[in-house]
Image (cartoon, rainbow, N blue to C red):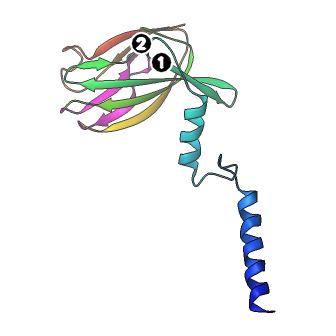
């Protein structure tokens, strides 16, 4: 083949590949984590009480909340939650280590102990009722790191 024909063939192939792609990335995401982040961003709508309800997970709605722990206080735990799965993003903005435990679930540690400046996520499934969320570190609970939540 002549050199000109090879250049024309390469240009046509490049144009053909460009025409097959799209700006909204219809192809598979680079990783499962990226796909989960994109899905959460697309499916999440904010609510007035600081909670967010994201899209279905196997047909079940998941309530998403963000809880910030600081020195002897939690911020972001709502007074009421809908029954079902709750995904908790936990940011430790304090210096001391903190966790998040649900007393009525046999003192289930929903968020494991993390150091100040760290973040993590955890999930818990709650039936209708009243629950006590608290920090199990030393005397943190008696110093104010406790909140009662009503699940409806």
Asked whether 84 or 10 is in front, the reply is 10
Quarter of the figure with the C terminus: top right
The x, y position of residue 148, in whole percent, is 37, 9
Quarter of the figure with the N terminus: bottom right
For residue 45, side relative to residue 131 (left or right): right
Magenta stretch bounds: 95-116
The x, y position of residue 63, in whole percent, is 54, 21
Report if residue 99 lies within the magenta region: yes
- Residue in view at x 56 percent, y 34 percent: 40
**Vertical position of residue 91 compared to residue 14: above or below:** above
**Vertical position of residue 32 compared to residue 119: above or below:** below
Q: Nearer the viewer, mark 2 or mark 1?
A: 1
The 10 Å Cα crowd at callout 1, few under 14, some 14 to 19, many 20 or more, is many
- Residue in view at x 43 percent, y 34 percent: 121
The 10 Å Cα crowd at callout 2, few under 14, some 14 to 19, many 20 or more, is some
Q: To which quarter of the image does residue 39 belong?
A: top right
Q: To which quarter of the image does residue 70 belong?
A: top left
- Please give the label number shown on residue 60: none
Give yes or no for contact between labels 2 and 1 (Cβ–Cβ under 8 Å).
Answer: yes
For residue 148, side relative to residue 22 (left or right): left
The x, y position of residue 134, in whole percent, is 32, 19
Residue beneath disc 2: 78
- Residue in view at x 76 percent, y 87 percent: 4
Query: Alpha-carbon distance for marks 2 and 1?
Result: 7 Å
């Amino acid at each position: 083949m002549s050199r000109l024909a090879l250049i024309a063939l390469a240009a046509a192939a490049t144009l053909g590949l460009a025409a097959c792609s799209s700006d909204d990335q219809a192809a598979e995401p680079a990783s499962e984590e990226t796909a989960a982040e994109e899905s959460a961003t697309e499916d999440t709508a904010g609510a007035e009480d600081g909670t967010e309800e994201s899209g279905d997970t196997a047909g079940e709605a998941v309530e998403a909340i963000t809880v910030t722990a600081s020195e002897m206080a939690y911020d972001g735990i709502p007074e009421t939650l809908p029954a079902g799965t709750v995904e908790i993003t936990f940011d430790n903005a304090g210096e001391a280590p903190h966790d998040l435990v649900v007393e009525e679930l046999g003192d289930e540690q929903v968020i494991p102990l993390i150091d100040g400046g760290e973040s993590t996520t955890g999930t818990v499934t709650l039936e209708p009722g009243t629950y006590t969320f608290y920090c199990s570190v030393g005397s943190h609970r008696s110093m104010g790191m406790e909140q009662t939540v009503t699940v409806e």
